[in-house]
Image (spheres, rainbow, N blue to C red):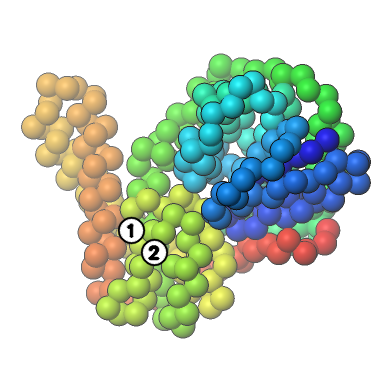
Amino acid sequence: MKIAIHYFSGCGNTAWVVKKAKEELSAQGNEIVLIQNIEQAWPTVMPARDLDLFLSPTYFFGLPVNMISYFKRLPMVANRPCLFWSVNGGASGASFFMARMLLKDKGYVVTRQASIEMPDTFLFLTQSQMTKDQRRQVLNNAIAQVKSAANDVANLQPESKESLFKLAFFGVVFLMFYAVFRFTTGLCMVANSRCVHCGKCAENCPSHAIAFGADKKPHWRMGCSGCFRCLNNCPAKAIDFSMWAVVFGLVGAIGGLSIIGSVFGFLGIISKVIGLFAGWLAGCYVFQCVSSMFNADKMLMLVDKKRVTFSSDENA
């Protein structure tokens, strides 16, 4: 069977899974005709294939905005079978449902889906801080999950649907991120005095949300996808979240609640929600504009956290 693989990888987890998937699928006699990193340009001519395999990390219990955009750019097909694998830190959330709906709009039919659990790169979670033995165990389990998923490639049967309660819960969490926090996540980041001005964070940002300012340090714009590639892969470990940004965001949220909630009070709870979100966004944006005025070595939130990086050559 000829298989084309499409993937996005923020910090290297999904790229690692792609390498293992290629090894396992090739060992079973399949031909991998394309490995498409969605950050790269499409090939001029798509190779003939029998099956497409899409792999995506899971951010805030849903698909990264980068992957959503990629699905929307896919050319239309007619009932083409495909697979979707969710790479996550323990919960696929609503990513299966989202992938099925987006791919269906393009004429794809998801015949198999799989969840591959990898070390979490979201540093605010304690499970991201694994020991070497814990990491090795998770990677060994991931290899077993890849093998199991690869064995199901030829079994083209539609997967059962998730429960409505699960979709509702994870969907609300994701929508909150998609509607608000993807615009403010980067705005809460700073580069401390360890920054060596190498520019790798801006160069490697998949959302192009980082630019260098007059102070020769990175500054973040709205549109961060939340992959944390800049945070985890900074060679100087100079990038962090600032508590000052949270303070500005909270002050802005209170102001937005007061102003918008009063002016548009006839909208009831809707005006309050809009006021909170708009105020939070405005506060974080203001912080990013004036962040150079603050001591970037203080009020940091992840200074003691071990960064989580991956190489596709890493062995379990």
- Asked whether, in this view, residue 231 is left or right of residue 114, the answer is left
Q: Is residue 273 left or right of residue 98?
A: left
Residue at x 44% of width, y 55% of height: 207
Q: What's the distance in space between the residues labelled 1 and 2, CA to CA?
A: 6 Å
Label 2: element kind: strand
Q: Residue 306 lies in what quarter of the image?
A: bottom right
Residue 215 horizontal/vertical position (percent): 30, 80
* Front position in the image: 160 or 140: 160
Tally of numbered discs: 2
The kind of residue on which mark 1 rests is Arg
**In the rendering, at what x and y percent does residue 106 appear?**
54, 27
Residue 21 in view in this figure: no
In the rendered image, residue 81, in percent from the top left (x then y), is placed at 70, 26
Residue at (12, 39) in percent of width and height: 259
User: Which residue is rendered at x = 22% and y = 31% of the image?
Assistant: 272
| Contact? badges 1 and 2 (CB < 8 Å) | yes
Picture disc at residue 203: none
| Image disc number at residue 221 | 1
Identify the amino acid type marked 2: Ile
Q: Compare residues 19 and 73 and report the one nearer the observer.
A: 73
Give the residue at mark 2: 210
Q: Position of residue 239 (x, y in %)?
A: 46, 69
Instruction: Name the quadrant of the N terminus.
Output: top right
